[in-house]
């Protein structure tokens, strides 16, 4: 009857794992495991409870998003349940405790996925650029490491990636015996899927990477194209809704569908 709460962090398989769970819903049910809700990851519920802003152009999250998730979890009391969203890593101490209490208290086991910070930095900067950041990588790194209090222009970065603080926060709530930290093995792309199968006692090979859509990282040149578009959007004072459709859902997705050469 355990509940597995995967809280991220960002850029550590937090798109691939929920997508694999979502696509295997019927198979999961056969093993008495419920991937809560009807969406890939529980982004809106996490944003609603943590107060996060989400991505430009997306609808704002509301309390109903969280209440609906809690209700679904309660309906599945006799099954093992999975809840996953990288946006839970933005919770402060009080919110994290409330999340655990409302999802089931002693029933909740927390999983944190991590990558080395040196790997996360370029990936995180790129994600911010895809959400309208205009700083170059060098400018952003300088701000994150050399300009106290290390919050601007992306206040969420250290909230998510001060990993010792993040792990300690959730361990104090659920206890170290109910918290698992998984360091992503970048030499074995399938290892994360197999690890989630083991900790949920699912058959080997049940979770499969999603096909037909790629969430690959952009190259340096591709990211620079998007950054220059961001500067132009700011100069022309175009609205966030246009950015959402034209850049995030338009340019970036089309770029990701192309095969980028190693040069």
Image (spheres, rainbow, N blue to C red):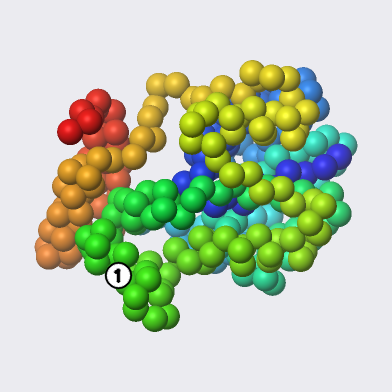
Q: Position of residue 83 (x, y in %)?
A: 67, 44
248 above or below 230?
A: above
Where residue 41 sits, quadrant-wise, is: top right
Q: Mark 1: which secondary structure?
A: helix
Q: Residue at x 59, y 33 (%)?
A: 192
Residue 52 in the image: state x and y as whole percent.
Answer: 50, 63
Residue at horizontal 83 percent and vertical 35 percent from the top: 79
Return the residue nearer the eye: 194 or 5.
194
Instruction: Please determine whether, in this image, residue 6 is positioned above or below residue 188.
Output: below
Q: Is 62 left, or right, of 54 in this rendering?
A: right
Q: Tell me: 101 left or right of 234.
A: right
Quarter that holds the N terminus: top right
Quarter of the image where one finds residue 76: top right
Q: Which residue is mark 1?
A: 142
**Most foreground residue, 220 or 7:** 220
| Picture residue at 51% right of the left edge, 60% below the top | 161
- Residue 30: name its quadrant: top right
Residue 107 place in picture, x, y as percent? 84, 49
Image position of 111 with respect to 98: above or below:
above
**Vertical position of residue 134 compared to residue 7: above or below:** below
Q: Can I make out residue 236 in this image?
A: yes
The reply, left or right, for residue 84 in relation to residue 123 is: right
The answer to whether residue 100 is left or right of residue 182 is right
């Amino acid at each position: 009857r355990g509940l597995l709460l995967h809280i991220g962090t960002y850029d550590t398989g937090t798109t691939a794992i929920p997508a694999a769970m979502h696509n295997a819903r019927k198979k999961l049910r056969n093993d008495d495991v419920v991937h809560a809700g009807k969406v890939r990851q529980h982004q809106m519920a996490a944003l609603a409870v943590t107060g996060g802003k989400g991505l430009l152009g997306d609808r704002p999250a509301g309390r109903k998003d969280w209440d609906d998730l809690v209700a679904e979890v309660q309906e599945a009391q006799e099954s093992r349940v999975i809840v996953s969203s990288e946006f839970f890593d933005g919770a402060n101490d009080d919110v994290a405790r409330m999340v655990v209490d409302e999802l089931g208290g002693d029933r909740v086991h927390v999983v944190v996925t991590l990558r080395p910070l040196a790997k996360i930095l370029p990936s995180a900067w790129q994600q911010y650029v895809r959400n309208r950041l205009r700083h170059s990588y060098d400018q952003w790194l300088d701000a994150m490491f050399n300009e106290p209090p290390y919050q601007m222009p992306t206040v969420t970065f250290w909230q998510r990636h001060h990993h010792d603080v993040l792990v300690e926060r959730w361990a104090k709530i659920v206890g170290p015996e109910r918290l698992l930290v998984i360091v992503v093995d970048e030499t074995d792309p399938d290892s994360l899927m197999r690890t989630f199968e083991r900790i949920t006692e699912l058959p080997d090979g049940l979770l499969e990477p999603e096909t037909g859509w790629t969430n690959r990282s952009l190259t340096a040149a591709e990211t620079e194209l998007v950054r220059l578009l961001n500067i132009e959007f700011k100069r022309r004072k175009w609205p966030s809704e246009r950015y959402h459709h034209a850049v995030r859902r338009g340019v970036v997705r089309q770029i990701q569908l192309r095969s980028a050469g190693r040069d």
